Image (tube, rainbow, N blue to C red):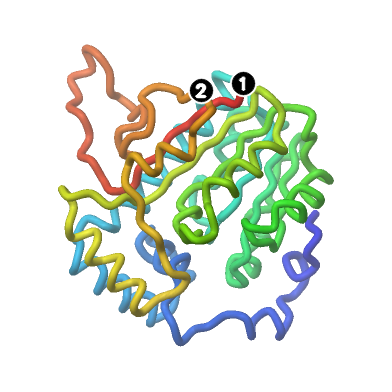
Amino acid sequence: MTDNPAATNDVAVSLRARINTGQPHTARIWNYWLGGKDNYEVDRAAGDQIRQLHPGIGEYARHDRLFLGRAVRHLVGEVGIRQFLDIGTGLPTADNTHEVAQGVAPETRVVYVDNDPLVLTHARALLTSTPEGRTDYLDEDLRNVDAIFEHAAKTLDFTQPVALMLLGVVIFIGDEEDPYSLVRQLLERLPAGSYLVLSHTVTSPSMPDVDEAVKFWNEHGTPKLTQRTPEDVTRFFDGLELLEPGVVSCSRWRPEGAGEGSGEGEPEEVAMFGGVARKN
């Protein structure tokens, strides 16, 4: 079930009116790069232009999704986490958080949070829980911490550890809004033993074409992005116990098949960095 009737009933005209098909939107472009169909011509055109500026940018979406899968499987299978609060869900694709988690432990509960009306229209795809577990969807903004926890408490038990998923969403919080304080506010609501999983695009002198792609996006698309250095991204984990290998390119966070004697070289670095950390 969901607290948002529009997510389970026929989509209301008012909801459709919130969807701007005349301006490219990051969630729809991400969907396009992942091979999805929930996008418009304006998104595909912008996505192709961005890819011309930075040919490898489509790989960010793929590696971010693979990072999500590896992090969730580790937290469920190795740590024993059974609750996830996934904020900035994006459009449903393959291997969503609940599918990965419940594939390991069917009793896992997941609450998705996003404020994109197009995501809301596809919320049914995020509510396909196993009978043993549960999924819910909240039409809410990352900044509204009180509202998120008030509604999520109907599905999640906040006296027990929760994995907070912030994949590719903090980039939409400008420095003037103090994103570090916002992440701390979210973590303060979670008990010891909870985890933060966060990914963020980065700016780096070794990847100047990324800056050009982001500049193009901020001139033409919505919502606007704020890039940060790898060191800035690491700050989001201050006060937490970072799991190895720390904050690294998402392609290099515990890649499958890697390790001593595997014969696999280190994966190519992408400008999407991420990490997983425990709250003690």
Which residue is nearer to you in this view: 175 or 88? 175
Give the vertical position of 208 relative to 5 (above or below). Answer: above
Please tell me which residue is depicted at 64% across the width and 38% down the height of the picture.
Answer: 187
Q: Amino acid at mark 2?
A: Glu
Residue 209, how many percent across, how many down? 18, 60
Task: Please name the residue that numbered disc 1 is placed on.
Answer: 280
Residue 142, how many percent across, how many down? 62, 56
Task: Using residue 109 as the reference point, say whether residue 52 is left or right of it.
Answer: left
Q: Quadrant of the C terminus?
A: top right
Disc 2: CA contacts within 10 A as few (<14), some (14-19) or many (>=20): some
Residue 100, how many percent across, how many down? 55, 38
Give the vertical position of 161 relative to 92 (above or below). Answer: above
Q: Tag 1, which secondary structure?
A: loop
Which residue is nearer to you in this view: 2 or 53? 53
Give the vertical position of 279 relative to 220 (above or below). Answer: above
Please tell me which residue is depicted at 71% across the width and 28% down the height of the picture.
Answer: 191
Task: Using residue 26 as the reference point, say whether residue 16 is left or right of it.
Answer: right
Q: Amino acid at mark 1?
A: Asn
Task: Please name the residue that numbered disc 2 is placed on.
Answer: 241
Mark 2 or mark 1: whose residue is earlier in sequence: 2
Which residue is nearer to you in this view: 76 or 216? 216
Measured in 3D between alpha carbons, the distance from the residue under mark 2 to the one under mark 1, in whole angstroms, is 7 Å
Check contact, mark 2 vs mark 1: CB within 8 A.
yes
Task: Using residue 115 as the reference point, say whether residue 65 is left or right of it.
Answer: left
Please tell me which residue is depicted at 58% across the width and 45% down the height of the picture.
Answer: 183
